[in-house]
Image: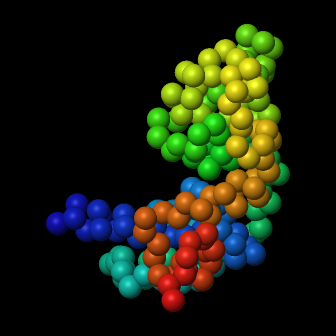
Amino acid sequence: MYHDHARHLENCPALVLNADYTPLSYYPLSLWNWQTAVKAMFLERVDVVAHYEREVHSPSAALKLPSVIALRQYVKPSEYPAFTRFNLFLRDKFACVYCGDTKDLTFDHVIPRAQGGRTSWENVATACAPCNLKKGGRTPRQAQMPIFGGEPIRPTSWQLQDHGRAFPPGHLHESWHDYLYWDVELDP
């Protein structure tokens, strides 16, 4: 029974907002598990903005689980994100820059390494495996494969967060809606 209760509580993450009440991150969505959120409450590092109906109990108290929390101290986001495969795919909106396909993604050196191309934001782009194979060790111009959307750039953290709004997670708790702004159509 305890195992089922604990598993059910795992479905109660808290949305983490910065001190300005904006999400720390859209993609991935800034969520803390209920234990971390409760610990931050007791350490007085967060303010509880909204609760779940679910409670946890100790021998002497009952506590509603937080569903939305805001940090008391503002965390300044870094201006530029780390150069990772995930962030690269997010910059390119999880689509091949040559054909737009969203399956079988990898990355491509726009100017091939054999021609002096470097592994950097400005020279690496998301490509599907067939386009990457077709392009081979050539530049897009040599392969006659234009890059849709222009040359690769080093994105800011704000640009990646903006792109992340286009990919809402499958489940959003109702108490989170006032703090999240997704690029999805609103119900009429």
Q: Residue 98: name its quadrant.
A: top right
Using the image as rendered, state which of residue 9 and residue 110 is in the foreground: 110
How many numbered marks have been drawn onto this rendered protein structure?
0
- Toward the bottom, the furthest residue is 188
Q: Residue at x 78, y 43 (%)?
A: 150
In the image, taking residue 178 as reference, residue 6 lies left or right, namely left
Q: Residue at x 78, y 12 (%)?
A: 115
Using the image as rendered, state which of residue 129 and residue 155 is in the foreground: 129
Q: Residue 109: name its quadrant.
A: top right
Colouring method of the image: rainbow
List x then y, in percent, for residue 68: 55, 76
List x then y, in percent, for residue 155: 78, 47
- Toward the left, the furthest residue is 1
List x then y, in percent, for residue 181: 63, 74
Q: Is residue 46 visible in the rendered structure shown here?
A: no
In the image, taking residue 27 as reference, residue 18 lies left or right, namely right
- Toward the front, the furthest residue is 144
Q: Residue at x 51, y 44 (%)?
A: 102
Q: Is residue 188 visible in the rendered structure shown here?
A: yes
Q: Residue at x 55, y 76 (%)?
A: 185
Using the image as rendered, state which of residue 113 and residue 69 is in the foreground: 113
Q: Is residue 76 above or below residue 67?
A: above
Quadrant including the N terminus: bottom left
List x then y, in percent, for residue 24: 67, 63
Q: Is residue 123 above or below residue 148?
A: above
Q: Is residue 162 above or below residue 93?
A: below
In the image, taking residue 41 as reference, residue 157 lies left or right, namely right
